[in-house]
Amino acid sequence: MEEALLLSLKRLLIPISCTNMLSAGSLVALDRQQAIRSSLVILLNQLRKMMLGYENEEVQGLLDVIELLVDRKLVAPQFGKSFSDGILEACEKLCNIRFSSIIGAEENVVGFDDEVATLLDQLTSTSTKQLQVISIAGMAGLGKTTLARKLYKDPLIEYVFDIRAWICVSQVYLKRDLLLGMLSSFINDHTEEIYKMSDEQLGEKLYRHLKDRRYLVVLDDIWDCNAWNDLRMYFPDDKTGSRVLFTSRDIDLSLHVRAARPAHVLRLRTYDESWQILQVKVFRTGICPSRLETFGRVITRKCEGLPLAIIITAGLLKNEASDTWWSQIAGSLHSFMVRDPSQYMESLTLSYNHLPPLLRQCFVFVGVFPEDDDIPVTKLIWLWVAQGFIDETGCRILEDVAQDLLMDLIKRSLLMIAKTRADGQIKACRIHDLLRDLCLRKAKEENISPQIYKDAPVPAMTSPSIITNTLHGTSLDPPALLTHSGFYYPFELGEVLLKGGSIIWETYKSLRIIDMETVPISLFPADVIQLGNLRYLAIQARDGNPQASISNLVNLQMLIISSRKNIVVPKTLWSMVNLRHVFIKSGENLMEEPCFVQETEKDGCPSELASLQTLSQISPQSCHNIFSRTPNLRKLGFCGPLISSQGNMEFPNIRSLVHLQKLKLLNTNPCREPTRLLNTMMFPEKLKKLTLSTTGMDWEEMWTISLLPNLEVLKLKFHACVGEMWEMSDTEIQRLKILKLHGLDLRQWVCSKDNFPGLQSLVVHDCLKLESIPSNIGKILTLNLIEITQISPPSSSSSSSSSSSCLPFLTISNGRFRVFLSIKPLAQHDSWCIIYLATAIDIAS
């Protein structure tokens, strides 16, 4: 819809600019006035259609402004800059309301159309079947990684190559990390044995996995040829058309690695391309109001065609659209010296200098994460809170304030979105190398954040935890294979724990954070209780049971435990009044009866844990007497028996959790017959996100879910519901925005647009029997995205019926099935297979 809106806006603004130069009474002016009014009517109708389902007083007021302009008898001189700016600003506000839940657009590759086409041809060409090395080179900030990601995600690339891997190499790397990283991209069965292998064994396993297959491996941010020399022997050349793609700042690297052709050296953007990027990054409509254009063009020239400079400067501008602010930035921005990154670090500092003091601390802290890593957003926010960076703001909790600060850094383009969740929320972010260098420089100058995370090497004879779900023989939320994104702090403490040595804990008595989640050790370290100042503790232990003395950590706020065994949480933990998050990554964990149940407050135990917000993942059989004393719990995960002998879903009473927003139910004792959900009064009224796994509910029971008044996200995973038919009849889940179906045996789905009036995203993964998506889904006006992914072919019966479906499954030669919405086919292979391009398309348009 945004593209259609942009086209209508351009059709409107061009005649306005021409009409303003004509005399009011001329025939040409009158004709153009009529054309403008006609364009306004078309635009207004588009906006009304776009805002269906988003009506409120603000939206109606903005639409009324445009309607008044349609009704007024304007003449040529009145179709001026203020008129066009008024239209643009109204459209901008409406777009921000309509698309606020759609986080971020694809990274901009303006000006690289020719490069994309050329590189796609070289990567997919069948003119030579030999393994080829192709490189993209250029100075920092030019967009090498952005271009490589564009290619890596291209549907044609996904179709042509059997398997793909993306590895960040960086200036400092470990060969083992690179091997494990590639294997984690290729294989799903993360067995324990793989962590015990030597580098040579890992390389041999990689070689065998790539043998006789057409593969693409991207090695991002290579500094010299050493990394390639370490890996080249593991890439077989079986004349299958495989490719290795480099990105590097070293233009001559392609010569040293014997690339198939000279490097693609990226150029600076032209002035027009730079101006286009700036507008797209600042404005939803992609059009700058005329009153700001003069300042914007001055700013664009000072960026000197460097994409990173343009994007960061856009982050300064997008939060404030006043003439004064834009004039100030235009005057204070220094021209970027593009030959040496250190020469334009001063200009990058401008964005830092405009940050509020609180945001500066949070930004600088991001520098503790290793170069080129995806940074988990939840972890980053918890670390900010643990460091004491976040201040209370009225009645808002610290994590919500931190989330706003994170979004502020993203809007300023100081952080980039790396991964998003199904509901559009940010899962992981990244920071550009140059901005990370800025963080480290400012940390040193201002002594804001002296600690630095270190890479966590994986020892040859140890392994991280693997949590096995005995129901399916698969891992339950298994940790990814450790690569250089596994890191820990403090480094020397991790080294000692890894080797089983003794620790002088007195050295660490002032420590606030211990992050050893990627360091596999035998036992939960008992001596850690001496660190009374600790706020954040993340441990991975074969036996992860914390000792009762853990309650001595009176200031602890976050406790994260990964283990190979089920955890028993001691009752003393419930006397730790500052706990905010208890996140356990294992199977079915037990909790001892808390002391405030067995004793009274007079005996020294608190009446409630007011700060506790997260509790995951615990057995429902061991927490019946807790929830009346945890009033502010917002995230809860049950893992254990949830089905009674009568076939009814059962779990402890959580109605008292009036702030609970997210609930995960993972059942471990499935029944042979479909189960029943007898009473939705089991759920708190404010519940927004519900995930069901292996609960085996009858599809007919799903009407009860519609009784949850605030439910926005529903995930049904791994036989959450059983049966081949889901007929929704008049069931209406009014506020549902995200629906995810994963690993279900559903064959037929009957619904109408009225069943999900506010649905924005539908995600269907590995529902192999599903014959079609109901065509009425496409009539939901709020729908932005449909994503369908199949790992193996559906049955012949489903294939035969797909011809009548709204979204038929398409056969792809490598056996992997993936269908997206699209306006037009991107590529065709033989006479029976079409790949469709899409990540998101507005159905209403």
Image: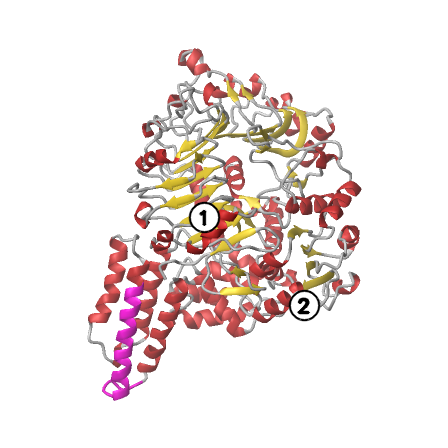
Of the pair 444 and 124, the residue shown nearer to us: 124
The quadrant of the image that shows the C terminus is bottom left
- In the rendered image, is residue 424 in sight? no
Could you tell me which residue is drawn at 76 percent across and 45 percent down?
A: 203
Give the image location of residue 193, x and y in percent.
Answer: 71, 34
Q: Which residue is mark 1?
A: 771
Asked if residue 718 is positioned above or below residue 832 in the image, the reply reads above
- The kind of residue on which mark 1 rests is Glu
Q: Is residue 25 left or right of residue 615?
A: left
Asked if residue 71 is positioned above or below residue 485 in the image, the reply reads below
Q: Is residue 201 left or right of residue 70?
A: right
The quadrant of the image that shows the N terminus is bottom left
Res 659 quadrant in image = top left
Give the image location of residue 653, x and y in percent.
Answer: 37, 23
Q: Which residue is mark 2?
A: 264
Marks 2/1: CA distance?
Answer: 44 Å
Of the pair 320 and 173, the residue shown nearer to us: 173
Q: Is residue 657 left or right of residue 509?
A: left
Q: Tell me where the magenta segment starts and ends, as one range.
A: 22-46
Give the image location of residue 715, x and y in percent.
Answer: 44, 39
Of the pair 231 and 473, the residue shown nearer to us: 473
Secondary structure of residue under mark 2: strand
Circle 1 residues within 10 Å: few <14, some 14–19, many ≥20: many
Who comes first in sequence, dot 2 or dot 1? 2
Q: Is residue 225 left or right of residue 561?
A: right
